[in-house]
Image (cartoon, grey):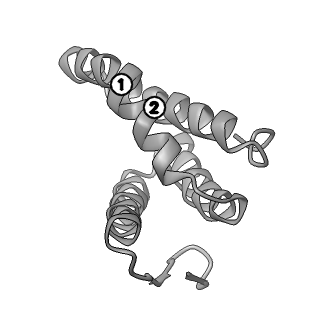
Amino acid sequence: MEQARHDLRAYGSAGLAFHFKIVKGAGNDLFVTIYRGLIPSLGERCARTTYTNVELTKHTLVDHRALNAAVQTLDEEAAVRRRSEHINWSRMHMHEILLGTRIQRKTSNTGSRRK
């Protein structure tokens, strides 16, 4: 994802691949099957809609790095927390896109605010 962050289409594809690794790592075959079925249509469209500017990629990279670090170190508490933060922020971002509102979130890993 690092290398693709200036190309939004490539970044979206890399983001989907990152999420698929998380899904596969969960070890749930049904979840893998559902995810595989959603990616060609809904996943690609969502990625194109979600990654709207290069600045945004910096923020999602922070989330993905933090989640990846928690998974790699087998820190289940941190992984659950990072996953929840990322999902909540993503949900708020989608609301921002759909409703034209502005969001801010304090991240626990950097103390910075997203805009």
Q: Which residue is mark 1?
A: 41
Residue 68 % position (x, y): 56, 46
Horizontal side, residue 106 vs residue 98: left or right: right
- Mark 2 element type: helix
Residue at the image point whose x is 36% and y is 29% from the top: 23
Crowding near pointer 1: few (<14 within 10 Å), some, many (20+)?
A: few
Give the camera-side residue of 103 and 22: 103
On residue 44, which mark appears?
2
Vertical position of residue 78 compared to residue 31: above or below: below
Residue 51 % position (x, y): 56, 52
Crowding near pointer 2: few (<14 within 10 Å), some, many (20+)?
A: some
Horizontal side, residue 58 vs residue 25: left or right: right
User: Which residue type carries mark 1?
Assistant: Ser
Residue at the image point whose x is 62% and y is 63% from the top: 56
Where, by quadrant of the figure, is residue 82 drawn?
bottom left
- Mark 1 element type: helix
State yes or no: discs 1 and 2 in contact (Cβ < 8 Å).
yes
Q: CA distance from mark 1 to mark 2?
A: 6 Å
Determine the residue located farthest toward the left in the rendered image: 30
Give the camera-side residue of 56 and 113: 56
Vertical position of residue 22 compared to residue 56: above or below: above
On residue 55, which mark appears?
none
Residue 47 % position (x, y): 49, 42
Residue at the image point whose x is 38% and y is 55% from the top: 83
Give the camera-side residue of 94 and 61: 94
User: Which residue type carries mark 2?
Assistant: Glu
Horizontal side, residue 43 vs residue 4: left or right: left
